[in-house]
Amino acid sequence: MSKYALTVTCKSTRGIVAGISGFLAEQGCHITDSAQFDDAETGNFFMRISFSPEEDVAVSPDGLTETFGEIAKRFGMTYHFFSETERMKVIVMVSRFGHCLNDLLYRCRIGALPVEIVAVISNHMDYQKVVVNHDIPFHCIKVTKENKPQAERRIMEVVEETGAELVVLARYMQILSDEMCQKMSGRIINIHHSFLPSFKGANPYKQAFERGVKLIGATSHYVTADLDEGPIIEQDTVRVTHAQSPSDYVSLGRDVEAQVLARAIHAHIHRRVFLNGNKTVVFPASPGSYASERMG
Ligand SMILES: Nc1nc2c(c(=O)[nH]1)N[C@@H](CN(C=O)c1ccc(C(=O)N[C@@H](CCC(=O)O)C(=O)O)cc1)CN2
């Protein structure tokens, strides 16, 4: 697996790839994986490039960030160097349905999802024991219409105290305030149990049953003030029939929701997701990045 990666966003023009590859060669690094997208519609250019220093070369994300500054300025780049072995700190939030939480705890434990879950927050006590059994701090923050601002202040305190870079709403069923969405823009990922844009809001499986659909699905997206309308990261579906009920949909949907959420988080923590207006650019996973540290 490569040791470092660079992500770049800028306006499209010629010479970008040459500038980046030439810079990395000059720094004594060889490129191990690269993906780029030139969006003709918006004129935006996106690139993610993995690289490793030669054996006798010492580099660091901070050092590369400074040295790359001149090239970045020339192309007006927004860029980020990072270590591919560093684990992102993540907070998981859940309400009553725990299938996505349990799936994430398992994937994290076997190393399939290389993150550090620094806390679990819930507005109910249902999952306190399972979380504590994973040696992860559990915070029960009750939410009512009257105390929502105070509850969100406490949530943000936990984010600050833990240094969490990402908050995952793993079936957390409370609408977050516009202020929190703005403050955490691009850092909150939700799993919605429908194939958006169909069936936004509460009870999507009931909505789907009443519509008579033949496919139900799940969508993972960044959270914005516009409910379930944030940039989509990952989606998938499963077939349903006329003979099944909304509770059958709940059962069928569990695995799809957990898989879609895990794929979205995997993409985010490896910085393969780029915001492109109200959409995303999602590059494919690098070779070996799904390997579990604890093979079965
Ligand atoms: N600002 C945002 N907050 C949340 C989003 C979002 O996109 N933007 N996604 C939701 C998740 N969600 C569907 O996936 C959802 C959750 C909750 C509700 C809702 O109506 N909640 C009620 C309370 C329900 C209860 O107490 O059981 C409410 O908050 O008043 C709709 C959709 C997570 N948050």
Image (cartoon, rainbow, N blue to C red):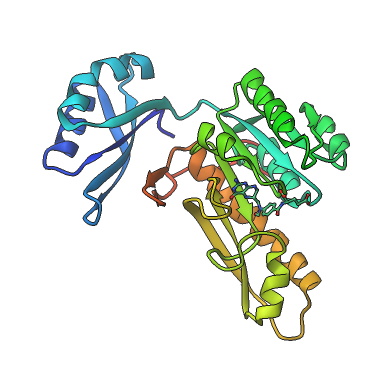
Q: Is residue 19 left or right of residue 114?
A: left
Tell me: residue 61, above or below residue 143: above
Picture coordinates of residue 89, whole percent (x, y): 60, 28
Q: Is residue 226 above or below residue 133?
A: below
Residue at image x 36%, y 28%?
80
Picture quadrant where residue 241 is located: bottom right
Residue at point 62%, 80% (across, down): 214
Q: Nearer the viewer, residue 192 or 290?
A: 192
Closest to the observer, 139 or 89: 139
Image quadrant holding the C terminus, namely top right
The residue nearer to you, when weighing 43 against 29, is 43
| Residue 118 visible in rendering | no
Q: Residue drawn 31% across and 19% down?
A: 65
Q: Is residue 19 left or right of residue 157?
A: left
Q: Where residue 283 appears, x then y in whole percent?
A: 39, 48
Relative height, residue 136 to residue 191 (above, below): above
**In the picture, which quadrant includes the N terminus?**
top left
Residue 69 visible in the current orientation:
yes
Q: Is residue 83 above or below residue 9?
A: above
As drawn, the residue found furthest toward the left would be 14
Kindly indicate the quadrant of the structure image that contains residue 228. Answer: bottom right
Rendering coords of residue 69 (x, y %): 23, 20
Spot the residue most to the front: 146
Residue drawn at x 65%, y 60% is: 193
Q: Please tell me in which quadrant of the rendered image residue 162 appears.
A: top right
